[in-house]
Amino acid sequence: MNNYHVVRVAPIVGLTLRQEIAADPSYQGLSYDEYLEKILAGNYNYSDVFAYEMRKLGNQVEEIVYDVEGLQKQWAKENDLHLEPDELWQEKIVLAQLKKLNPDVVYIQSFSRITPKAIYAIKDQIPNLKKIAVHSGFPNGMDVVTKDTLVLAGFPNIQKTFSELGCETHLLYHFWDERILARMQPTERQIPFSFIGTSGNGFGDGHKTRYWELLKLAHNTPLECWVDDKDAFQDPESDANPFVEFPLKEHFYKDLAADYSQYPKPTSPLRYLLPRGTAHRPVYGDDFFQTLHDSLVTFQRHTDTMYSEIGAMRVFQATGAGACLLTNDGDNMTDLFERDTEVVTYSSLHECIEKANYLIDNPEKAKEIAKKGQERTLRSHTAKERYAEVHDILQKALKRS
């Protein structure tokens, strides 16, 4: 089988973003197809890049965005799918969509609220279904996967784990969507040092180090944070950054040799603890990429669950957008970028602060590294490259099935 019919099942993920979509009147009254087109055009998370690249390779492709309630319930309404008041609508609607589309391949974007276990429940009801593939960028899903699942792992240790479970597993890093460059506005670097993403608050112990490092960075550098803080900014009239002095002595902020395993799990919105004026509302889609583009230096801290490896989506987004990336080091760094030439790495918080302040004080050096990092990403880490790999892997898997 050279070409095939594939449906990707993907989330929007961000709670704040889903709240904003639900409150946006421009989505009201849209048909399902119009609603989906508007979501994908918003350039959030994964956008329509999967469909765009896979169609260029000759495949029939559909997208399901399963965690936007208004979108999915509009599909249910148009297709006369009855939902009970307390029913798990996400799973029921996705399964009904897949049965109707009847693809050769279901491609699940991450083990999340919709898991392969749910898909397996109706596998026999999708006559054409030949393969379930999952892209896993986080170490979970080991309890639901079966040996006939094709796993595309975003990190080497995730690849190793699923291979040991008997799954066919391939290493497939995240990427940069080249089309985004044309959507950016050319500007001079206006933001000396940025962080754009989730703080770790509300995400369990796996994000603990990121949360505490961000707090200390903000008190020792000119870091500005566009931070998704789990509880979000639900009151649009509230002060986005109402600083509340952390109930510890001042030396806490200056202690750069902390053992974060001994720190408490984050329970407070980080924006309350950052210096006043340095926390901003989270940004998504084109605003997210423009903020990266406008940053001289941008910060990335991988979660504590990544086995000392790097490769989060923001690594490729930051370099692709042309910012100088400052990230924690990883055992696999040489597979992706050249240290301190294409990206800047750190192994301790003290080193991170020292390098951040050096780059801010030496903007031409930061721009030089940013340029080389962007060139590397455009050469080696594009969506076109990655989905050509996916296409080849799926072709071979389907020929064996």
Image (cartoon, helix red, strand yellow):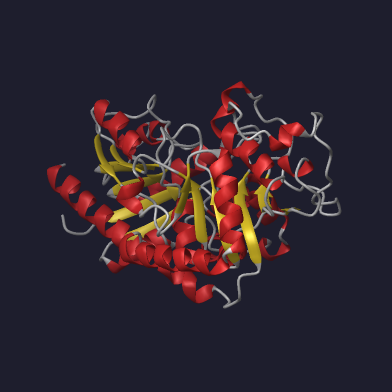
**Taking 371 as reference, is 200 above or below it?**
above
Q: Quadrant of the C terminus?
A: top left
| Residue 147 rendering spot, x and y as whole percentages | 25, 29
Q: Is residue 116 left or right of residue 149?
A: right
Confirm whether residue 72 shows in the render: no
Q: Residue at x 63, y 51 (%)?
A: 70
Q: Quadrant of residue 246?
A: top right
Q: Residue at x 32, y 64 (%)?
A: 384
Q: Residue at x 72, y 40 (%)?
A: 270
Q: Quadrant of residue 166?
A: top left
Return the residue found at the far bottom: 186
**Taking 29 as reference, is 186 above or below it?**
below
Front residue of this view, candidates 108 and 204:
204
Q: Quadrant of the N terminus?
A: bottom left
Confirm whether residue 278 shows in the render: yes
Q: Residue at x 61, y 21 (%)?
A: 262
Front residue of this view, candidates 351 and 160:
351
Front residue of this view, candidates 295 and 91:
295
| Residue 239 rendering spot, x and y as whole percentages | 85, 51
| Residue 39 rendering spot, x and y as whole percentages | 56, 60
**Taking 364 as reference, is 215 above or below it?**
above
